[in-house]
Every structure is written in structure tokens, then in C-alpha cells.
Image (cartoon, rainbow, N blue to C red):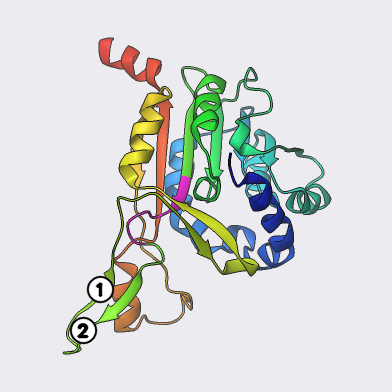
Amino acid sequence: MTNSSEDLRLWNTAATAYTATVSGPSDSFYRRMHGFLWSRLGPVDDLDILDLGCGHGWLAEQIRQAGARVTGIDGSQALLTAARSDYPEIDFHQYDLTLGLPDPARRYDRIVAHMVLMDVPVLDRLFADVATALPDTGVFVFSILHPAFFNHEIVDDDSGRERYRKVTGYLEQETRWIESFGGHRHYHRPLSWYAEQLTAHGLVITGIHEPLSLPHNDSPETEWTDYQRWFSTIPTMLAMSCAPAQRTADLRDG
């Protein structure tokens, strides 16, 4: 049993707030992983690319504009309604990601999952289907909220000389409630869990990116305060790139 039906209900309820808040390429999370994402995707002209957990479709549109044939899949019908309205040239499908991919026999040159996996209660079938859907030259790139540092309390010690994030319960998998966009569930898993599950399902990690955390009021025209400089040094998101295990084995043996 999973919480997927309730999760999808919550995301349908949150869709209006989410689409108004996550404003496409200017979104803080995208700005942080932009360079890593596109360096791992490489040239995408004439490639088939899957945007997994595409939400309201803005990233799928960025990839389409770069020359790819893009398919978007998401569990939230409300988010997909917005996506289809704004980006009619993209093929969007509604599917519960806990069940994997709707057509795992279909191949994609690249698969992208931006800020979605930590919101899916079960990932085993999805990882297995992603590995099957990629050719030997394929790439899977995903980003998540950082398992070690996201949503942990910021503490200033009594002396005022030290500031840190209070990390507790890191190794325990648990379901957390996040208030953003009206409220949704977040599924915390340690980094080692992701590495073990990816490997178990035929994917090998080829890159890890821990970008600076941008302050909420970040502005290129404004000099950062001491607090903002400190805040930026503890990453609150994480990105990974993966390749099919057979490809990496061939490169090693060849």
C-alpha cells in the first residue's frame, strides 16, 4: 500500500499555488542546477526526451525549444491541465509514478526528473522502468531536495559566533509534512538509499551536484549579507546524473 492516491489529491489541490510560485526558468532550484542539467543532457536536437514528473510543463518546454521531441508525464491532472493549455506542442500523459512508466518498452534518449522523486512514496518500479527505457547511450538526470540539509532547523549558538543547521534523524526513512503550496508529503531517504536503489535497478551514478543554496530574497543587483553568504554554503538541493550499467561496463572493459 502507498499514499499515492492521497498524494495526487494534495497535488491537484496545490496546483494553482504551485504554478503561481514555481515560475519556470527563473525558479531558484532550476537556476541552481541549470549548468549541471544541460552539461549532462548535452545537445538534445532531434532526441526523444521524457520529463518525468513534469508538473505544469515549463521544463518540458525549455527542452522542446532546444530541439528535442518531449513527452511529459505527471500524476496530477490539475497540473497537466495547465501544461496542456500553455504548451500544446508537447505530448503530456497522466500516470501514477509509483507504478513506474505507462509504457516501459518505449525508449527515450534522455530522462529528466526535476524536483519530484522526493514527493513519490515508492520509487522501485520507476527506477526499474527508467533503466529499461534508456538505450546504452542514454542519460537519466534528476534533482531532489537535499536529504541531509533540507528543512532542518537553522540554529545560532548563544555566543552569536556560530550558525549551523541542526541535522537529526538523517538515516531513518520517514514521511514529512511540507507546508509549501498548501501542504504535501515529502518522503525522506538518505543519499545512500538512492545510490543503492539506482544500482540495484541497473543505473550507475555518473555525476553528483550540490549547488549553492540561493537565499529566498536573492537578487543579482544586491550584495549578499553575512547571513546570505552563510546560507549559500549549505546545499538544500542535490542533482545526480546516471547511465545504464551496461554502458559503463562496456566503457570500463573497452
Q: Secondary structure at mark 1?
A: strand
Q: Is residue 93 above or below residue 18?
A: above
Q: Is residue 6 magenta?
A: no
Q: Secondary structure at mark 2?
A: loop
**Is 95 on the left or on the right of 30, as rendered?**
right
Range covered by the magenta-colored residues: 143-149
- Residue 89 is labelled as none
Q: Residue furthest bottom?
A: 159
Residue displayed at 53% across by 22% down: 134
Can residue 169 be seen at all in this image of the molecule?
yes
Q: Are marks 1 and 2 in contact (CB under 8 Å)?
A: yes
Q: Nearer the viewer, residue 241 or 254?
A: 241
Residue displayed at 63% across by 29% down: 101
Count of marks, rendered view: 2
Residue holding disc 1 = 164
Q: Is residue 146 magenta?
A: yes
Residue holding disc 2 = 157
Residue displayed at 60% across by 47% down: 3
Q: Nearer the viewer, residue 67 or 21?
A: 21
**Is 43 on the left or on the right of 212, as rendered?**
right
Density class for disc 1 (Cα within 10 Å; few <14, some 14-19, many ≥20) is: some
